[in-house]
Image (cartoon, grey):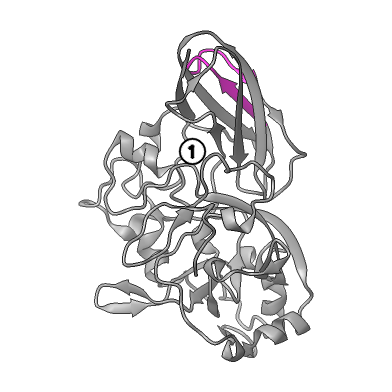
Amino acid sequence: MPLSDKHIQTKTYDDILNAGPPLDQLAKEFVTPKELFFVRNHSQIPHFQLESYRLRVRGMVTRELSLSLTEIKRDFERRELTATLQCAGNRREEMVDYKPIDDQLEWGIEAIGTAKWAGARLGDVLTAAGIRSEAAAHVAFLGLDKVLDGADNEAYGGSISLDKALACEVLLAYEMNGEDLPLAHGCPLRVVVPGYIGARSVKWLGEIRVQAEESANHFQQIGYKLFPPHISSDTVDYADGMPLTKLPVNSVIVRPQAGGALPAGAVLVEGYAMSDGEHEITWVSASADGGKTWQRADFMHEPQLWSWQLWRTEFTLSPGKHELVVRAWDSAANSQPETIASVWNFKGYVNNAWHRVPVTVE
């Protein structure tokens, strides 16, 4: 499915679409227009007939369900939620600059977006199916796509805890920004798991399974696990990895961009900040001297759970080279580490070090 020419294509392999917005359009509005919302795929977009689509609900349930999109819309209350999704690999490019990372998309700061989602609550669907075992602890998802993994074609999948699945914010979304969910974003149905890495918001959803253990899918057991900096691809034991779920507190300078030449005088600095969704961003501080001195940034809207916080501040800069830096805190007093070295990992996930942007003032 072609995207608007407002998108830039970040990287493709085997005709797999991955795209993000031009940086001069990123985070200019609280709600991201769908044509500017980043796209992350692990396979080609699947082909299917909407008329024959069924969502299967099975596993540790009292009764298995097979639901058409029409039945989902008819039988379950429509819920709305504005929420930010962010790829676990957002800001990987900075990690690559620090130390090489193999075979991963080199996202900059653009793998993030906020949308008005609408659909059925996952918890309502699970309640209709009934949880039949006290051993049930996880809810696994499978997409309709096929991802080449060695000699096997495996659907993209993952899982979240049952507690999270039953939370009121988790949706089975069939609308995005007031319109039918676009094919590139998971039509006919995708999971939206606010506060978690985007990889858990499985697109083109075909199956939900209630089970005792985490999903055995490649992308749960290997693809999206976090390791400390001293672990490499040569020494990794994936059984020891931490499955990625909640996003860490983060903040980013969107404008001005690195390497730009700016006129002396007042310089407007803008960006976004995000936490795990359960905690509001309470403070964003920016620096124009590499972190020696700081000033508080202004928020562009009231804090809202599950969504990013857009911010701005202004510096008066003299001619010369300057390093702009930003860091944020959330309502649980979480903040960001100072250096890339402290968060680097061989997959390049969840970079939340202070964001630094060198600029030249003329």
Q: Secondary structure at mark 1?
A: loop
Is 96 rendered above or below residue 134? above
Q: Is residue 279 left or right of residue 78?
A: left
Is 273 rendered above or below residue 39? above
Asked whether residue 100 appears in the rendered view, the answer is yes
Q: Nearer the viewer, residue 69 or 237?
A: 69
Percent x, y of residue 20: 49, 51
Farthest-out residue, front: 5
Mark 1: give few (<14), some (14-19) or many (20+) Cα within 10 Å. many
Give, as a three-letter code, the residue at label 1. Asn
* Residue 342 found in image quarter: top left
Percent x, y of residue 112: 55, 49
For the point 64% across and 20% down, the residue is 314
Range drawn in magenta: 283-296
Percent x, y of residue 80: 76, 63
Q: Is residue 133 left or right of residue 321?
A: right
